[in-house]
Structures are given as structure tokens and as C-alpha cells.
Amino acid sequence: MQPSFAGTPFAFTAIASCKNADTKEEREIFIPQVHIIDPDRPWERYSNTGDHKDPITLLEWESTGTRLLSGDAGGRIVLWQMKNHMLNDWSCSTETHISGEPIVATSWLHGVSKLYFDVDNIECPNWLEVFKHIPFQPSLKLHGSSHAEGWIAVTTQGMVTVKLLNLKGESEVSQRLSQTRPIHVAVADIAFQSSGHILIAVADGSTRLPVHVFRITLKWERNPTISHLKFLNKECMKPQIGSRATEQLVVCASGSNGSCIEICTLEKEPNPLNIPQVFQSTQMNRDKTSSQLVWMHRASHTDISTVSAIAMPRLPLNLSSKIYNGPGMCLAVTNVDGTIKLLHRLTLRLCDAFKYEKVKPDSQGKRQKVLQGKHVVCMEMSNSCCALMGVDRAGSVCLFRIRPMLGQSVDQGALRAHTISVVVNLFVYCLVTGFDQWDVILRVTPNMVEAILDKLTNGFKNQPKATQELLMMKFMSTRAALYR
């Protein structure tokens, strides 16, 4: 029997046999029971026999006496909660199953303060000075330094599980006390320090082996799940002198409170050689340092909404220290609230943002944009990064145009001239690679056609004869597409 007392209610466990059993085998089946009674009215007992199938190993009251934890040898923890403030009316609020391992210890997470009986001031006439509030750091801090409600449990195999209550999203996490070797726990206990750390003492039951005490720290991860993992460049070329590293990784972590996008770069880091003086040669003196490749954090971007899709730029760029803000310098991010953002590929700075609006015809046959409350679930950029294609949650395919130049703070005349130059370079890229130029044409306006044709034709005429013969058919096709 496992008794537990907290304030007014009293709880204990028992094992009962099946009543009204017809056969001897059925009468020998024993069922664990949880009994909760009020000491003032012990005849009004609450009993439950259906939630535990294995022997109950522990009971743990919350400090208010309105919630009770019961754990069994099968790894099941049940939360009992008082209904309508009635001591003889309880219900199972939630359950946790820890991989079939018996529970040996459990405790509720600590709050922010504790009221102590100060024996040094027991004769003080001021009652408030006899009982003092001693500040405690919460076992687990949430947003705004508020403390989390939940419990921590220890199993026989050294598994520590933390369960949080009244929290959206992921609310349970487990980890073993020892990552290097397995341990067996026969008895354990849990204590809390004022600094917020948790002490867990474990022993395997033998006097020949030491008692281990672990100090653990709980940390609330705002975004506990890595939802997206993408390389910025699919083909990582060897960086030249003065150029940027091409091995770049984009990591997106999401949770119920938003998302965080980080970008990391594989770079060389000096690694000094610690060699004794007697073993150093003349060559070592000339080169006392070596280098190693490490992933370095470069930039991050946070958002209050969850990221649903990320599209990487497909235009291969050989970047240097020179400033460039043309096509291929942005990655697209869409959120579940319908927002689509374009972030700079090096700094993750916001370059542009817009809301996803589904286009549908109205009753008069005209086309109007109506916000449908849906979001894009997958996206992909075109080869020249001038268009963005996606599919929303309802299965509709959408197409977005991306400006060739983003974040340019220049006058309109200079911006138009620079845009024409960038578009011509993209047409040349399509001519050389053989890609279709449909996405580049999306960014061409009627007043830009003549200027683009003149610049493209002059550049084509300056090419060698062999190059002109090689690209003639594609060049004529591009001119025809611009004239249409």
C-alpha cells in the first residue's frame, strides 16, 4: 500500500480481486486501486479501479491538495483532479506512459517561492515575520519568466521524463540520466534548489555501489522542432580568393510560439598546434597553426508565426565581398498566417513581404483577390529566381512574380536602368544554359522591351562568330518572345 497525505485529502492504494467472478481464474485476477478520502468524513471514499493495470508504486500530491499523481510498475502516470471542489469526486485528467519502465520517483515542478517557518523569529509578535517567503527560481521558466506547471518522474532505467500541463504543442520530453552507460535505479528521490536546478539521487539498492546524485537544469525551448533543413547551394564549389563560402545550411525550428530561421556557413578556423618545443622543427616554427572546418552561425530571423514552407534560390551565384542585390539573393518563406517573406540569403534581412490572396472570379465575371484564410504549404523558385510557384492547403496552384532588384534605395530612373541590365543578364543566362526564359519575361513591362532588345542585340553582335552561330536559334526565339 502506498499512502500519501496533503493538507485535507488522504490517498492510498490497494489491490482488490475481481468481484462477482464466476471462475477461480477470474477471482485470482488482482486490480490496483486508488482510494482518496476526507479525514473528516472517512466513510465517503472515492475509489478507482480502471486506470492502472500494474501495481501502483507511488503517489504524489500537489501542494494545493487538488491534484494527485499515481505511477505504476508499467510506466504509466495518471493525473487525478478534483471535480467541482468535491473531496469525494475525482477524475482522471491526463495520462503519461514512459516506455513500460517502472516509476520509482516523481515530484511536481517547483514554483517561484516557498513559505518557511522561521524558528529564529518564533517569539516575534509580528506573525508575518515568523513565516517568511523565500524566493525560488522556477524549475522551468516559460515566456515572461512565468513558471511551468507539470511534474518530473524517474524510472528504473534512469529515464527522466518531464510533463507540462496547460501548454499547447509538445509538452513531454524524456532523457536518460547517464548518456555513457546504462544505470539501474531501485530507489530515487527528487529535490529542488533555490537556483532552479533539480537534484536527483539514485541508487541501485546495493551497499557496495555508490549513491549517485545528478543536478539537472530544465530549459524551455521556444521552438522545439526542426521543421526545415535545406542547403542554400546544392552544388558547393571550391571558394576562390575573395569569394564567400558556398557551403551554407538553412535551419528552421518551429513551435507553438513561432519559428526561428538560422543560417550557418562552413568556414576555416585556425587550430593552433600545441607541440612541445623539443619536438618542433624549423618547418613547424614557420607554420605553427593549422586550420579546421567548422560550422559558424551567421544570421537568424524570428517570427511569431509557424513556417510552413521554404524555397531556396536556384540561380547559382559566385559571390564575393562585392555588394550584389540582384536575382538569387533572396530565399522565400511562407507562414501559416498566409504571409510570404523574401529574406536576404546572407543576413536573413527582410527584403519584401506580402499576403497570399487566392484569385477567384466574382458573380460578374471579373477577377478579384479575396483572402481565403489559407496558406501555401510548398514552394519552389524558378531557375532565374524571378517567379515563385506554390501549392496552398486547398490544392490550388499559385504563381508569384519576384522583382529582380530588391531593397534598392535609388531614384526611379536609375532603378529602371539597373533592372533592364539585370533582365538582359538573365536572358543571356537562359541563352547559354538552355533554360526557358518564361519567368524572366514575367518581369518585362511594355516600356522596357525596346531597351532590352537593343542591349541584348548589341551584346549578341559583339560575340565571336562561333558563339553567334551556336546561339542564333535561341537568340531569335528570345526576340520573338519579347515581341509577342
Image (tube, rainbow, N blue to C red):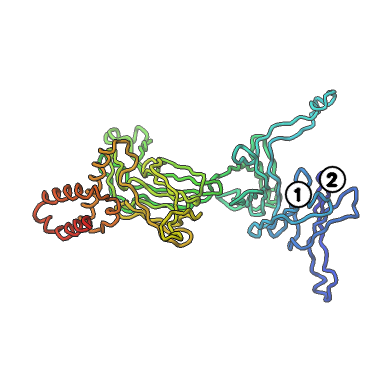
Where 447 falls versus 273 (above or below)? below
Q: Left or right: where does residue 252 sit relative to residue 2? A: left
Q: Secondary structure at mark 1?
A: strand
Residue 480 placed where, x, y %?
19, 58
Residue where numbered disc 2 is placed? 8
Classify 10 Å Cα crowding around label 2: few (below 14), some (14-19), many (20 and above).
Answer: few
**Residue 293 visible in the shown view:** no
At x 58%, y 42%, the residue is 219
Q: Left or right: where does residue 162 sit relative to residue 10? A: left
Most foreground residue, 210 or 335: 335
Where 426 falls versus 434 (above or below)? above
Q: Quadrant of the N terminus?
A: bottom right
Most foreground residue, 203 or 456: 456
Classify 10 Å Cα crowding around label 1: few (below 14), some (14-19), many (20 and above).
Answer: some
Amino acid marked by disc 1:
Arg
Most foreground residue, 446 or 416: 446
Residue where numbered disc 1 is placed? 67
